[in-house]
Image (tube, helix red, strand yellow):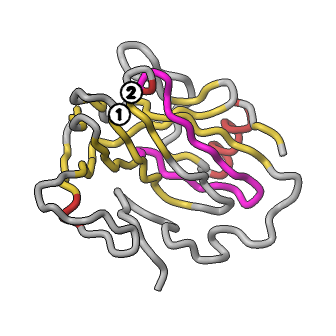
Amino acid sequence: MGLKADSWIRERCKKDNMIEPYCESQVGKNVVSFGISSYGYDIRVSNEFKIFTNLNTTVVDPKDFDDRNVVDFTGDVAIIPPNSFALARTIEYFRIPRNVLAICLGKSTYARCGIIVNVTPFEPEFEGHITIEISNTTPLPAKIYANEGIAQVLFLEGDEPCEVSYKDKKGKYQSQQGITLPRILK
């Protein structure tokens, strides 16, 4: 299994629409950077957010998520309250090849501000927007800039294709659009 370079990412995006829209270069002037890098791709956060709130005093239950746990926000700058959490989505839509696993890590610009980004691996043949988890670990409000970089995706190519892909097992988040809240298969 090998980490894939910019030339491989570029080829897959042009040939297979692996990332759409795809930014051919790394954009970084006056913004949190995004686009292709040496061994990855810096993804952007859209302007749609679901910010956690305690206004309705519900319990966060991954098996029975209550929509009242979040408030919807759309805008160019989202303010994440102190010691709070938000969900967002990527601008980019992904089509992961069958022999590839992608891992996403938060950008250092945000990490240095106490903002942690978590995304689970993009499994082979996953398709969709990525739901991003953003934690503000500081005691201060934190700004998240829409349409700018939020995390970097690294692509690992397997030595052989997997027997069962995310698409094969009809993954519960397959082809997700927008911000997708927690789901349990029933």
State the residue at coordinates (31%, 46%).
86
Magenta includes 95?
yes
- Amino acid type at circle 2 is Gly
Left or right placement of residue 98 versus residue 180 in this view: right
Q: Residue furthest left?
A: 55
Magenta includes 174?
no
Q: Position of residue 116 (x, y in %)?
A: 43, 35
Task: Report the disc number at residue 110.
Answer: none
Please indicate, yes or no, whether residue 21 appears anywhere in the rendered image.
yes
Disc 1 on helix, strand or loop? loop
Which residue is denoted by mark 2 in the rendering? 114
Q: Which residues are magenta?
A: 90-110
Disc 2 on helix, strand or loop? loop
Which residue is denoted by mark 1 in the rendering? 137
State the residue at coordinates (71%, 40%).
11
Q: Magenta stretch: dominant SS?
A: strand
